[in-house]
Amino acid sequence: MGSPAPGEVTGLLLAWSEGDENALQQLVPIVYKELRRLAHLYVNRERAGHTLQATALVHEAYQKLVDTPRVHWQDRAHFFAICAQLMRRVLVDYARSRNYQKRGGGIAIVPLEEAFGAVQDRGKDLLAIDEALSALSAIDPRKGQVVELRFFGGLTAEETAEVLKISPDTVLRDWKMAKSWLLRELKGGARHDA
């Protein structure tokens, strides 16, 4: 089965945003495969032993999506951009929850000698990326959106350009600058304008 036509998805999104719950029921099976692909990308970036599975991530994001007050959907790309943001929030909340547990929230105490041999937790990396991305978005919202759509959303430069209504060349320039800024930020360098 091929990808659904963008017009079909957009039509259902517009109907849903006008209150047609039946449109949502028709939309979900059409977009589910793509949402699972995005979720799979996210989960594969997590540490080994990560317990949140792609299906659970899609379901959590879906629950947040349907609990959101009416959104005026622009098109298919806008929908996937919002889903990418929701999945990012689910993963960040999950990482925060795991870090809480590691600080004594019901987890067994590990002797200090064993702790030194433990592998660094990628959940902390996700939180650091989230904080750095929030800082970048405060300085340059478009570059923050480019990172969110490309890194968290798994969108191509062309798809990102479609969502943001800019050229693919602009996306690639923003992507390159944002990656450099984020790398510097994550390494603890001085903050500079994006």
Image (tube, rainbow, N blue to C red):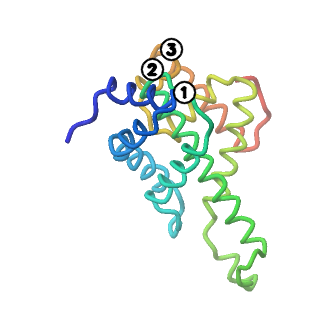
User: Which residue is located at x 56 percent, y 28 percent?
Assistant: 146
Mark nearest the camera among 3 and 1 is 3
Q: Nearer the viewer, residue 68 or 162?
A: 68
Disc number for residue 32: none
Which label's residue is closer to the chain start, 3 or 1?
Answer: 3
The residue shown at (69%, 23%) is 140
Q: Which residue is mark 2?
A: 162
Residue at the image point whose x is 54% and y is 54% from the top: 60
Quarter of image, res 118:
bottom right
Residue 125, percent across and down?
Answer: 64, 53
Pointers 1 and 2 in contact (C-beta within 8 Å): no
Depth check: 177 or 152 in front? Answer: 152
Quarter of the image with the N terminus is top left
At label 2, which amino acid type do we have?
Glu
Give me the disc on residue 175.
1
Image position of 14 (left or right of 144): left
Give the residue type that dot 3 points to: Ile
Question: Residue 166, labelled with which disc?
Answer: 3
| Residue 186 image position (x, y, % from top left) | 69, 43
